[in-house]
Amino acid sequence: MVPRLRSFIGTILIIVLVIVYALAATTIATLLLATSPWWVHFLYFLLSGLLWILPAMLIIKWMAGPKPKG
């Protein structure tokens, strides 16, 4: 695949990932954490704020293309 096309597709995928992940994380927090103490909110948003990085790293790795041989 052409690197430019790979970068374009990867960029679109990351944008979709961030939007869907933010909506899902906020919905889960609204439904489950409404009456929780502040420290539960803090831990949830700390972990959920960092968790999206894992799939984004996979997309970025794919965007970089295969490793050069040799």
Image (spheres, rainbow, N blue to C red):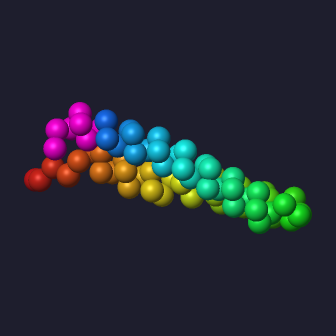
Query: 3 or 26: which is nearer to us?
Result: 26
Q: Is residue 8 left or right of residue 32?
A: left
Can you tell which quarter of the image residue 9 is in? top left
Q: Left or right of 8: which side holds 26?
A: right
Please state the horizontal and vertical placement of residue 4, each as a whole percent of the image: 23, 33
Q: Residue at x 65, y 56 (%)?
A: 25
User: Residue, x 16% and y 44% (percent of image)?
Assistant: 1
* Image x and y of residue 46, in percent: 69, 56
In the image, 41: left or right of 24?
A: right
Question: Which image quarter: residue 28?
Answer: bottom right
Residue 51: name its quadrant.
bottom right
Q: Position of residue 43 (x, y in %)?
A: 75, 61
For the magenta stretch, what is the residue range? 1-7
Vertical order, 4 against 46 (above or below): above
Q: Is residue 3 rendered magenta in the image?
A: yes
Is any atom of residue 50 visible in this view? no
Nearest to the observer: residue 70 or residue 21 = 21
Q: Is residue 28 visible?
A: yes
